[in-house]
Amino acid sequence: MVETRESAAMLEAIARRATDAGVFGSVQVRGTRLIAPARCPAAPAEYRIEVEGIDAFVGVFTADRWLSHSVEADLLNTGDDLEELLEEELIELGGSAPAPTIDHFRNDEKLFAFRSKAGVGAGDPRAAEVLGTLLLAYEACFRHLGDMHKDTDDE
């Protein structure tokens, strides 16, 4: 994957926004990927923006099968639709609806992923705004699902 100045600048701008939001661990940009660790999950998980060629993807990833299944079980038990939950969070953040489709799979890194093609690439002038909003909507949506956020005494 070739990193361009355009995608690097976009990811750095989104990283600043994500850091300022205060809902992630230490946000980092590594090549064509922004990594934002989830705060207080029951098992390690991270939110990502991945630039692949002209496409950009937003998702949440974990190596822990139990954590992934806890999200699935929560959706099954409540009957909630994941895309509708994401759309509600997007609207709350001033983003546009409808929410992108969320694919759930195990990737080549052997991580369980919930991931969406963002519909905007690094070359689009709106990319930083759209991707940043989608990243924050993903966090707000998944924070309440399964064991993505364990209770702590400090809260």
Image (cartoon, rainbow, N blue to C red):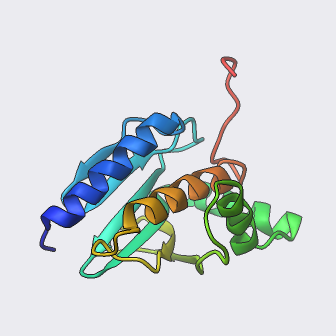
Q: Is residue 37 visible?
A: yes
Q: What residue sits 67% from the left and 25% below the top?
A: 152
**In the current view of this chain or complex, which residue is farthest to the right?**
78
Viewed as shown, does residue 62 lie left or right of 121?
Answer: right
**In the current view of this chain or complex, which residue is farthest to the front?**
125
63 in relation to 149, above or below: below
Q: Position of residue 1 (x, y in %)?
A: 16, 74
Q: Position of residue 63 (x, y in %)?
A: 45, 57
Q: Position of residue 128 (x, y in %)?
A: 38, 60
Residue closer to the observer: 75 or 131: 131
Viewed as shown, does residue 66 lie left or right of 74?
Answer: left
Q: What residue sits 58% from the left and 58% below the top?
A: 138
Q: How many marks?
A: 0
Q: Quadrant of residue 74?
A: bottom right
Residue closer to the observer: 34 or 97: 97
Q: What residue sits 30% from the left and 56% below the top?
A: 11
Q: What residue sits 59% from the left and 61% below the top?
A: 68
Residue closer to the observer: 96 or 75: 96
Q: Quadrant of residue 4?
A: bottom left
116 in relation to 44, above or below: below
Q: Quadrant of the C terminus?
A: top right
Residue closer to the observer: 16 or 84: 16
Q: Is residue 109 visible?
A: no
Q: Position of residue 106 (x, y in %)?
A: 46, 74
